[in-house]
Image: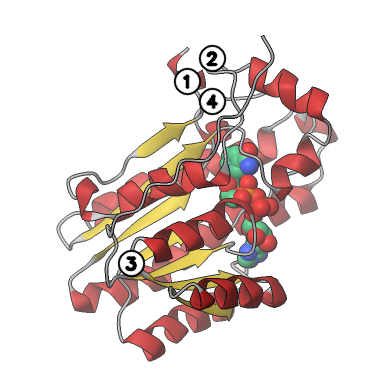
Amino acid sequence: MAYANPPPLTLRAERLKGRVVLVTGASSGIGAAATRLFAAEGAKVIAAARRKDRIAALSRELVDEGLEVAHVELDVTDEASVAAAVGFCLERYDRLDGAFNNAGQGGGRGPVHTLDVATFDAIHAVNLRGVFLCLKHEIAAMLPSGGGSIVNTSSIGGLKGGAGNAIYGSSKFGLAGLTRCAALDYARDGVRVNAIAPGPTRSEMFDRWMPTEEARAAMAESFPMNYIAHPADMARAALWLLSDEARWTTGAVIPCEGGLSAR
Ligand SMILES: NC(=O)c1ccc[n+]([C@@H]2O[C@H](COP(=O)([O-])OP(=O)(O)OC[C@H]3O[C@@H](n4cnc5c(N)ncnc54)[C@H](O)[C@@H]3O)[C@@H](O)[C@H]2O)c1
């Protein structure tokens, strides 16, 4: 049977009312969907990304809808840039309550002996070191006001090994470990740190990897639920972890991947 995506869900509550939330990689895909959803749920969102034109346009659109969204340029590989983005949140709102560390980079596929070190370093610099830098500065900003909630974007590639996926997979496995360790560091300080582990999700990154409908259908078919997710499906999982509804959940890496890791 051919796969068919159902229409996006449109739920709306106020799970993040008044919370100041930083979203990285907000210019497209899961990050853009999260910016929209978190703002609709009452958060004051700071959309952070390298592509300033795109986050400016997204925040303008959401502000015009009556939502509270600001934007700041951010390259997660650069510690000064991360510190400045967190500083922007503190200057503007005097606090930081939540963060969705979602910026990520794909690519670098192939068997290990064919891979080059520069590609390994570049992908790990975003997916693992970049999230480390974000955690470091975000947590320092959250501690004085009593804590907060952080969600990182790992991947199904960080839960299961995959042929040809050594670089990306190891960065996302590392991120799952970083999430668990940081969660334990701050378990008694009111800072929760969790991760979502998306499976195939329609985004720019995904479409670069799976450029044809045939490829996407074959990918969907290889998953138990025969499904390619909407970016908003991932944003919704992150929303739950960010919100007080998940107040007893920390150090979790939640699979959002149509059942693959159940096998
Ligand atoms: N789409 C999928 O199938 C899938 C599956 C598993 C995990 N993920 C993860 O989801 C996250 C979001 O990806 P997406 O699918 O929405 O793709 P996307 O390409 O639309 O979004 C990735 C975002 O990260 C940003 N980014 C990359 N390097 C950055 C840097 N140095 N500094 C700041 N921002 C940077 C990009 O500009 C982009 O906005 C990534 O971490 C990705 O690894 C995606």
Residue 260 place in picture, x, y as percent = 51, 20
Q: Secondary structure at mark 2?
A: loop
Q: Which mark identifies residue 259?
A: 1
**Residue matched to label 2:** 224
Q: CA distance from mark 2 to mark 1?
A: 6 Å
Tell me which numbered mark, 2 or 1, is placed earlier along the sequence. 2
**Residue matched to label 4:** 160
**Residue matched to label 3:** 42
Residue 11 place in picture, x, y as percent = 38, 47
> CB atoms at circles 2 and 1 under 8 Å apart?
yes
Residue 229 image-quadrant placement: top right
Image depth: mark 4 or mark 2 in front: 2
Q: Amino acid at mark 3?
A: Gly
Tell me which numbered mark, 2 or 3, is placed earlier along the sequence. 3
Q: Secondary structure at mark 1?
A: loop
Image depth: mark 1 or mark 3 in front: 3
Q: In the picture shown, does residue 163 fall above or below 66?
A: above
> CB atoms at circles 4 and 1 under 8 Å apart?
no
Q: Secondary structure at mark 3?
A: loop
Q: CA distance from mark 4 to mark 1?
A: 12 Å
